[in-house]
Image: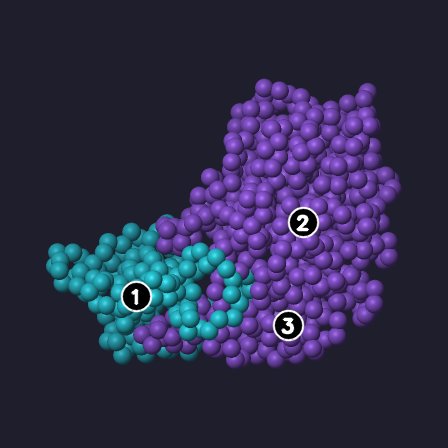
């Protein structure tokens, strides 16, 4: 790949600035560059070039000195990462330093950050599902939050557009609550998953169990290789088989010759010009030199990730916007959402002792939402809904820990595949709630002397009612599917652990109650676009990243069209 | 040579007695080395003796290498030295000392010096009286985990140290770093031992 142009200081003026280079920022960069705009991407971390900067991508456990274990120094830098359990020696370098970048948990909240080029697109789960009108109409229907300014028909073609480039594998089913994507061939279910699927679909009218829809290539696409089933995605994929900014959108943006990416650029604020009535640039702090620089552009895409985007907007004050850019409604920072998960059930499956599988599939099963649909069963305990992820596998040598034996015979036994286990864990929609909020904390400053965020959010009664139902339903499904030794669970985790934080700068029809319009523009500052998770007016129960991609491509198209009409 | 033949071949190699010098042969060949045969970075001599003896009892040499053959004891000492917090380090030392003290009370000697019958009896007693880990989902235990205690934690570490070693991971278990495909239903006989990765 050609080197990225990182010499931003030669020119201080661009057509467009994109703040952040994660999933949505990468898409903004690609779309704007391809439409001919000289685009500056501001990245607060370092450059991570595809393949070249994936130092652990091929390491086996024994290639790492502590075989994946972290040293006390590493753990000290990553208290949040350690709490999530997602961090290890193989991916530590892709997790942000929690000490340099503190935040305040008014109530417990896990905020997982990845401060480098590509952001969390290097670490994400890759589950990709379209939202449906069940989601876009939900707020209007039950009165929680404000109505979305868009419907499925507004975004449908943009889903197709981004899917064709990102590469989404899955199976088309024609379910109205989970519209089909433009699919590459699906990954395969294993024997036990096929068996459980058959049982569940027979036992329950209207329930489906499908292979997960994922942003992994099952066929080569645009020079990227297909998934090799190593399941080492969070180290960076040498084949470019899963969607990341590093492997997919940023190289495409770079190929236009229009991209400049400036690393080590912490965005302090967006500069608003009172006379012009629009934003004129972005003020950054160079994280290595502490130098302050202002870059100017006609349009600004803020894609720093949900909470960082809101933090930047809150920090962007002016006499027109004393409470943060675009915050006429007072809703900036409010309505923070996430998905509950780690509520479900696990059990053993008898038989299939002579069956096994090959490959480490970076994917599992999905059970789409089946309650509170337009037709079918309605709950009297909660609004909205939930789906499940999960999967089946045979126990490996780890089964030895809990076995009641040891010694030579034991050792040789656990070298053979153990019992088949199968689990499902729910993902529940969270309601937009004004009381779940973030705000600037000027008492706690980060390493660069900037105000930090206080996060004050917790699950409400509706989310807890869904959790209770998810647990009951999970056990019942596994029982009716004939599983044994079933354990149901609710790990009662704090918000943020789903790493699907959404809201805090929501889209809406009315500037009095929302921050962004139906094209992701700040109502009162139309040359600033927010197309990451901050924009979401509700949370659905399905994974949000694909919707960020589609909203971003749509907004970029609108931005360029408005620029051409001299409207911005 | 296809992959299965390769596996069979390496499996035979691993099972042969000449391929891997055991701790015993090391000790015999060099009488000047310390009793232990290796110099712990963190544990004291008695504690290191305990770890060596423990991992050897859980995972002795059979037709496949034992924990000592792949230096599981040396690895665990390294893990304690380099990845544990100061508190964690103090705790593991205290836990080993306590385990040895209990052995002395019950069997008259520290664990490493017990007869193999008494070692077995001692660990059987631990198995019968200690909690197990909850089932895990995506690497996290589900539900409220009751404390499992030192024995089961150490057993878990012994398995990790043993199975994540290059010799076992590459040459004994079924090793396939780049599967290239996912096949959901294949006869277990086509794979043989459990996948190492």
The x, y position of residue A20, in whole percent, is 63, 36
Position of the C terminus of chain A by quadrant: top right
Q: Residues within 10 Å of mark 2 (few under 14, many from 20)?
A: many
The x, y position of residue A493, in whole percent, is 63, 58
Q: Residues within 10 Å of mark 3 (few under 14, many from 20)?
A: many
Q: Nearer the viewer, residue A130 or B110?
A: A130
The x, y position of residue A415, in whole percent, is 38, 70
Q: Quadrant of residue A489?
A: bottom right
**Which circle, 3 or 1, is nearer the viewer?**
1
- Which numbered circle lies on residue A197? 3
> Label 1 belongs to which residue?
B9
Q: Nearer the viewer, residue B6 or A52?
A: B6
Q: From mark 1 to mark 2, how far is it between C-alphas?
A: 45 Å
Rendered colour, chain A: purple
Instruction: Please give left or right for residue B88 compared with residue A456 in the image.
Output: left
Q: Secondary structure at mark 2?
A: helix
Question: Label 1 marks which chain's residue?
Answer: B
Q: Looking at the picture, does residue A551 appear above or below residue A407?
A: above
Q: Secondary structure at mark 3?
A: helix
Instruction: Please give left or right for residue B42 compared with residue A296 in the image.
Output: left
- Labels 1, 2: one chain: no
Q: Is residue A1 visible?
A: yes
Q: Residues within 10 Å of mark 1 (few under 14, many from 20)?
A: few
Q: Is residue B161 visible?
A: no
Q: From mark 3 to mark 1, how far is it between C-alphas?
A: 38 Å
Residue at the front extreme? B1
- The residue located at (26%, 76%) in the rendering is B116
> Label 2 belongs to which residue?
A163
Q: Quadrant of residue A175?
A: bottom right
- Labels 3, 1: one chain: no
- Which numbered circle lies on residue B103? none
């Amino acid at each position: 790949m050609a080197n990225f142009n990182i010499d931003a200081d030669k020119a201080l003026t661009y057509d467009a600035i994109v703040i952040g280079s994660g999933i949505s920022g990468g898409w903004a960069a690609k779309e704007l560059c391809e439409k001919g705009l000289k685009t500056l991407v501001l990245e607060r971390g370092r450059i991570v070039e595809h393949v070249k900067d994936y130092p652990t991508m091929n390491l086996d456990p024994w290639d790492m000195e502590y075989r994946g274990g972290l040293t006390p120094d590493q753990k000290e830098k990553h208290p949040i990462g350690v709490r999530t359990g997602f961090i290890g020696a193989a991916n530590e370098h892709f997790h942000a330093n929690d000490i340099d970048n503190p935040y305040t948990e008014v109530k417990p909240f896990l905020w997982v950050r990845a401060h480098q080029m590509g952001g969390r697109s290097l670490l994400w789960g890759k589950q990709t599902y379209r939202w449906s009108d069940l989601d876009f109409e939900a707020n209007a229907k039950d009165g929680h939050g404000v109505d979305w300014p868009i419907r499925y028909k507004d975004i449908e073609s943009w889903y197709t557009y981004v899917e064709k480039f990102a590469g989404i594998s899955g199976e088309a089913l024609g379910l109205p609550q989970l519209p089909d994507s433009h699919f590459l061939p699906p990954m395969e279910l294993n024997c036990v998953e096929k068996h459980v699927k058959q049982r569940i679909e027979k036992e329950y009218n209207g329930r489906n169990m499908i292979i997960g829809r994922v942003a992994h290539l099952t066929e080569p696409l645009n020079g990227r290789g297909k998934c090799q089933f190593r399941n080492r995605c969070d180290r960076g994929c040498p084949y470019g088989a899963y969607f990341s900014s590093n492997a997919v959108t940023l190289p495409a943006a770079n190929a236009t010759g229009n991209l400049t990416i400036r690393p080590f650029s912490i965005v302090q604020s967006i500069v608003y010009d009172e006379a012009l009535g629009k934003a004129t640039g972005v003020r950054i702090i160079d994280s290595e030199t502490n130098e302050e620089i202002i870059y100017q552009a006609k349009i600004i895409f803020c894609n720093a990730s949900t909470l960082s985007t809101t933090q930047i907007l809150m920090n962007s004050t002016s006499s027109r916007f004393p409470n943060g850019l675009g915050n006429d409604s007072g809703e900036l920072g409010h309505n923070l959402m996430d998905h509950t998960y780690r509520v479900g059930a696990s059990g053993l499956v008898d038989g299939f002792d002579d069956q096994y599988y090959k490959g480490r599939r970076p994917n599992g099963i999905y059970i789409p939402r089946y309650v509170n649909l337009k037709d079918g069963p309605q709950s009297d305990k909660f609004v909205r809904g939930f789906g499940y992820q999960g999967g089946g596998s045979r126990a490996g040598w780890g089964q030895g820990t809990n076995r009641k034996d040891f010694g030579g015979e034991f050792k040789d036994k656990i070298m053979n595949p153990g019992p088949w286990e199968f689990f499902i864990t729910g993902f529940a929609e969270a309601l937009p709630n004004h009381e779940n909020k973030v705000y600037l904390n000027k008492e706690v400053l980060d390493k660069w002397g900037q105000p930090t965020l206080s996060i004050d959010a917790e699950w409400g009664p509706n989310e807890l009612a869904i959790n209770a139902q998810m647990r009951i339903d999970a056990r019942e499904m596994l029982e009716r599917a004939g599983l044994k030794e079933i354990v149901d669970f609710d790990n009662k985790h704090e918000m943020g652990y789903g790493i699907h934080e959404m809201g805090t700068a929501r889209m809406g029809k009315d500037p009095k109650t929302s921050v962004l319009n139906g094209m992701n523009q700040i109502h009162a500052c139309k040359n600033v676009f927010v197309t990451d998770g901050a924009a979401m007016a509700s949370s659905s129960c399905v994974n949000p990243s694909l919707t960020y991609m589609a909203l971003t491509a749509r907004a970029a198209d609108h931005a360029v069209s408005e620029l051409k009409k001299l409207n911005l | 040579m296809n992959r299965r033949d390769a596996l069979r071949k390496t499996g035979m190699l691993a099972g042969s007695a000449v391929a891997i010098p055991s701790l015993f042969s090391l000790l015999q060949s060099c009488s000047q080395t310390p009793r232990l045969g290796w110099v712990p970075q963190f544990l004291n001599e008695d504690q290191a003796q305990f770890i060596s003896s423990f991992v050897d009892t859980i995972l002795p040499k059979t037709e496949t290498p034992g924990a000592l053959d792949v230096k599981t004891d040396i690895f665990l000492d390294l893990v304690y030295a380099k990845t544990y917090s100061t508190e964690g380090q103090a705790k593991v030392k205290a836990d080993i000392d306590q385990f040895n003290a209990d052995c002395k009370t019950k069997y008259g000697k520290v664990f490493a010096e017990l007869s193999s019958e008494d070692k077995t009896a001692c660990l059987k007693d631990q198995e019968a009286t200690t909690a197990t880990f909850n089932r895990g989902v995506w690497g996290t235990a589900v539900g409220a985990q009751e404390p499992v205690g030192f024995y089961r934690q150490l057993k878990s570490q012994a398995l990790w140290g043993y199975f994540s070693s290059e010799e076992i991971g590459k040459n004994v278990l079924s090793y396939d770093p780049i599967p290239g495909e996912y096949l959901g239903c294949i006869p277990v006989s086509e794979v043989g031992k459990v996948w190492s990765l």
